[in-house]
Amino acid sequence: MDATATASTPLRRLAGGALVLAPALMFGGMLTSPPQADDSSERYLASLAADYGVSLLSANLLHYAWVLIALGVPATLTLLRGRRGRGLTAAGVALSTFGAIQMSGMLLSDWFTGAMPNTVPLADAAKVFDTVTADPSLALWRLTGILCGVAMLPLLMAGLARAGVVGWWTVPVILLPFVAAAMLPAYVGAAVALACYAPLVLVGVRLLRRSAADVVRAEALAASTPTA
């Protein structure tokens, strides 16, 4: 059996499982994200502090969802059989992985922002929060996380669609999870967001299928067959 095909089998299994599980964790994180009365710093901090345990559950789920996406996305390159769509997919992999790393790191702040209002007066906590979030480097961190982690997933899907791995319907659908979560009521938004992550689950299933023994044998046979 071809060594490359054999070596890619555990990678595909791990990555496929990660991409199937990530949307479920994202759904749980959105579902447990505490509601806030308005967009002010005080209300945001108060919402996190109101039920610190639930806030940390949400932060953990979202953090590990992004970790799983960062781990799973690079393996999508093993689904390509030729050069078609490879450039788009490679760009989508690089940007989406970087964005997922940025987004997972941002979740660390929830431990501090949730604890501050229960430790110091809310006005003082809000002052610290506003000072930190006003820093340009943090703003850049947040912006690159959002743009690359969310907006670049459609680029990845476009590359895979061009290569024939998934359908073109995945491109607009993968854009919608955060729009749904932001514009719809909490439970409805989280449910719609989960449905919109279906393209990631589909890619995960494709990776799991490509790690099956019969597919690995077929790939090895195709690689060993001389071309005319």
Image: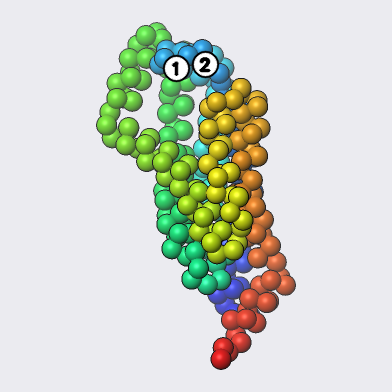
Q: Is residue 103 shown to the viewer in this render?
A: yes
Q: In the orientation shown, which residue stands out farthest toward the right?
A: 214
Considering depth in this image, is 160 or 58 the residue closer to the camera? 160
- Rendered location of residue 73, percent (x, y): 52, 54
Query: What's the residue type where badge 2 is placed?
Result: Gln
Q: Which residue is mark 2?
A: 36
Q: CA–CA distance between discs 1 and 2?
A: 7 Å
Amino acid type, residue under disc 1 in the picture = Asp
Q: Is residue 83 above or below residue 196?
A: below
Asked whether 158 or 66 is in front, the reply is 158
Residue named by callout 1: 39
Residue at 42% from the left image edge and 45% from the top image edge: 148
Q: Position of residue 141 (x, y in %)?
A: 35, 37
Residue lying furthest left in this view?
136
Q: Which residue appears at 56% of the width and 88% of the height? A: 227
CB-based contact (under 8 Å), mark 1 and mark 2: yes
Q: Quadrant of residue 32?
A: top right
Q: Is residue 28 visible?
A: no
User: What quarter of the picture does the C terminus occupy?
Assistant: bottom right
Would residue 100 be found to the left or right of residue 196 on screen? Answer: left
Horizontal side of 151 relative to 123 (left or right) equals right
**Toward which corner of the image does residue 101 lie, by quadrant?**
top left
Quadrant of the image for the N terminus? bottom right
**Residue 21 location, x and y as percent?**
64, 45
Mark 1: secondary structure: loop
- Asked whether 105 or 188 is in front, the reply is 188
Residue that extends furthest to the bottom in the rendered view of this protein: 228
- Image coordinates for residue 169, horizontal then vertical, percent: 60, 50
Q: Height in image: 22 above or below 93?
A: above
